């Protein structure tokens, strides 16, 4: 019995550092929740909640609501995306969505259509409530 308990403890502790991959050609319909990082090269229709970093590859497509800590987007996003820290849009990224993020980096060639709220402290990214920065805190 002790052997089973020790392996359960190990898998729980490594769960936060796990990396999940949805390969090209894979289609998922539903919601994903993970404590680790995730890379999507396939297609996801539904919501995704990532405690770590989300990477959407050039062949990746997400249609739905996204909530994550950091995101690196090279593929297609349709819906809504909330990023607590940094959202990086690569040259091949095509977004048709509303963005809520603290910081954004956009490479030349990236395409974005929708609204973008950024900066300040995001208290509740799920509810899209954010605290607006003071005038002296704004940067270009």
Image (spheres, helix red, strand yellow):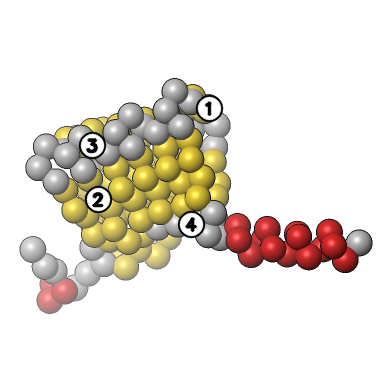
C-alpha distance separating marks 3 and 1: 21 Å
Left or right: residue 74 compared with residue 134: right
Which type of secondary structure does the marked residue at label 4 adopt? loop
C-alpha distance separating marks 4 and 1: 20 Å
- Mark found first going from the N terminus, 4 or 3: 4
C-alpha distance separating marks 3 and 2: 9 Å
Q: Residue at x 19, y 53 (%)?
A: 105
For label 1, the crowd category at 10 Å Cα-Cα, with few meaning under 14, some 14 to 19 and many 20 or more, is: few
Which type of secondary structure does the marked residue at label 2 adopt? strand
In the picture of the structure, the residue carrying the numbered disc 4 is 51
Left or right: residue 70 compared with residue 134: right
C-alpha distance separating marks 2 and 4: 17 Å
Q: What is the number of the mark on residue 88?
A: 2
Q: Residue at x 20, y 35 (%)?
A: 92
- Mark found first going from the N terminus, 1 or 2: 1
Q: Position of residue 120 (x, y in %)?
A: 26, 67
Q: Which quadrant does the N terminus fall into?
A: bottom right
In the picture of the structure, the residue carrying the numbered disc 1 is 29
C-alpha distance separating marks 1 and 2: 25 Å
Q: Residue at x 42, y 37 (%)?
A: 40
- Looking at the image, residue 91 lies above or below residue 135: above
- Mark found first going from the N terminus, 3 or 2: 2
């Amino acid at each position: 019995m002790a052997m089973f308990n020790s392996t359960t403890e190990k898998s729980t502790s490594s769960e936060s550092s796990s990396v999940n991959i949805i390969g090209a050609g894979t289609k998922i319909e539903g919601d994903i929740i993970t404590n680790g990082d995730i890379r999507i090269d396939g297609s996801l229709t539904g919501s995704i909640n990532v405690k770590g970093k989300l990477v959407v590859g050039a062949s990746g497509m997400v249609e739905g609501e996204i909530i994550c800590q950091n995101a690196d987007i090279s593929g297609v996003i349709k819906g809504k995306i909330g990023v607590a820290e940094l959202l990086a849009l690569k040259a091949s990224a095509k977004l048709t969505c509303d963005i809520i993020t603290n910081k954004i980096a956009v490479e030349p060639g990236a395409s974005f259509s929708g609204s973008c709220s950024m900066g300040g402290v995001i208290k509740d990214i799920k509810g899209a409530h954010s605290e607006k920065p003071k005038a002296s805190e704004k940067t270009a």
